[in-house]
Image (spheres, grey):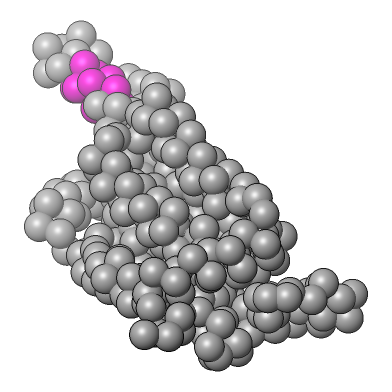
Amino acid sequence: MSPAGNPALEHTDFGASLAGATPRLWVTHLLVAINVLVFVAMLLDGAGILEANTKVHLRWGANFGPLTKEGEWWRLLACTFLHFGIVHVAMNMWALWGAGRLAERLYGNFAFLFIYLFAGLTASFTSLLWNADRVVSVGASGAVFGVYGALAAYVLRQPGSVPPSVLKSLKGSTIAFIAYAVVLGAAVSAIDNAAHVGGLVGGFVLACLLARPLSPRPPMTLARGAMATAAAAAAVATLFSYVPPPAYSYAAQQAAVALIQQFSIDENALAAKASVLVEDRKAGRITNAQLGEAIEKDVLPGWNAAHAKFTAISLGDKAPAAAKLAALTELVRVRRDMFSEYAVGLKTGDAGSIKRAEALSATSHRLLEAMRNGAREPPAKP
């Protein structure tokens, strides 16, 4: 049997060539260490060992359209070092450890780091373009797919450099990782297959420009490095130009959620004030006119303030809280107008104001019922 057909000799000669081309491996080790350390730190911050905690992941830099596209572009890379559970990080680091060390030897330390980070960026950009602000995306899998893309690029650009026995040994782990990533990406919203495709393509394309013969390996020329850098910059600029504006403002969404949560407290307080005044009137402790004045002084300002807060938030129709905010804004308007009419009617004895107040009260009850049923009633006319 010739040395070329002997798997043991193939591995020995190939291993020697790899070691000669890239004597020290540090990029893969560093990337794995960073991912693991970040995962541990996030566990201490409450991320969860098995399940995602979206609030924690967003705080640490998850890629989410309404935040990323509002100027927090650092998330495009930060998200590639975050994971939503121990299985997620373990599988990604297992794949990176296996494929990354070979790719780092083939391309050299800094070229490999360049490919990895660029694949992470293209993965994140692809996620932004595909998912339309619906997905909170995390994970190194897009960048790891880029590593596999780099291995494929090397085999194509430098045919015969990687022995068939070495490729065969990678086949099983490659298939296992891709199957895991695709299945999990289809099942878990925090892991999106769009990022996997973007990372694979990004890693493959850039690696095609950086692949050099293994033995003897020529030095990376300034021209080659400049060409690869220019191509990567052009790709990033092109992807950036296609990113649409956010579907809604994340800050406005958070403000709306906080206001909605606070509203139930404020509403109970205002209802309690009104209830005390009504009981005083029933007991004869105050007159109708005094009741009207008290409503105008103690109750109506609260509803005016609530209405001003609700109408101050500009929230697009696509925001998760949009429907509830719109329904509550209408409810607050009706309640405000209702108490205003009651105050005027009770103070002046105007039967028309009382009648309008009673109609608005009925509308308020219908709005509440519609909200409980998950529906929206058309805005009421005062």
Query: Which residue occupies 10% across, 57% down?
Result: 373
Residue 126 shown in magenta: no
Residue 212, compared with residue 121, is above or below; it is below
**Side (left or right) of 363 relative to 304:** left
Residue 130 placement: quadrant: bottom left
Where residue 177 sits in the image (x, y, percent)? Answer: 30, 66
Where residue 238 sits in the image (x, y, percent)? Answer: 68, 83
From which residue to which does the magenta span run?
A: 269-278
Residue 320, compared with residue 340, is above or below; it is below
**Side (left or right) of 330 relative to 198:** left
Where residue 221 sits in the image (x, y, percent)? Answer: 86, 76
Residue 218 placement: quadrant: bottom right
Relative depth, front residue between 140 and 224: 224
**Side (left or right) of 161 relative to 290:** right
Residue 51 placement: quadrant: top left
Residue 253, compared with residue 343, is above or below; it is below
Relative depth, front residue between 151 and 317: 151
Q: Count how many numbered circles sit on residues in the image.
A: 0
Query: Which residue occupies 53% across, 70% down?
Result: 14
Query: Which residue occupies 33% across, 70% down?
Result: 169
Q: Residue furthest top?
A: 285
Relative depth, front residue between 303 and 80: 80
Q: Main secondary structure of the magenta part?
A: helix
Query: Which residue occupies 62% across, 59% down?
Result: 19
Quadrant for the C terminus, please.
bottom left
Res. 15 in view: yes
Q: Residue furthest right?
A: 222
Where residue 228 sits in the image (x, y, percent)? Answer: 76, 78
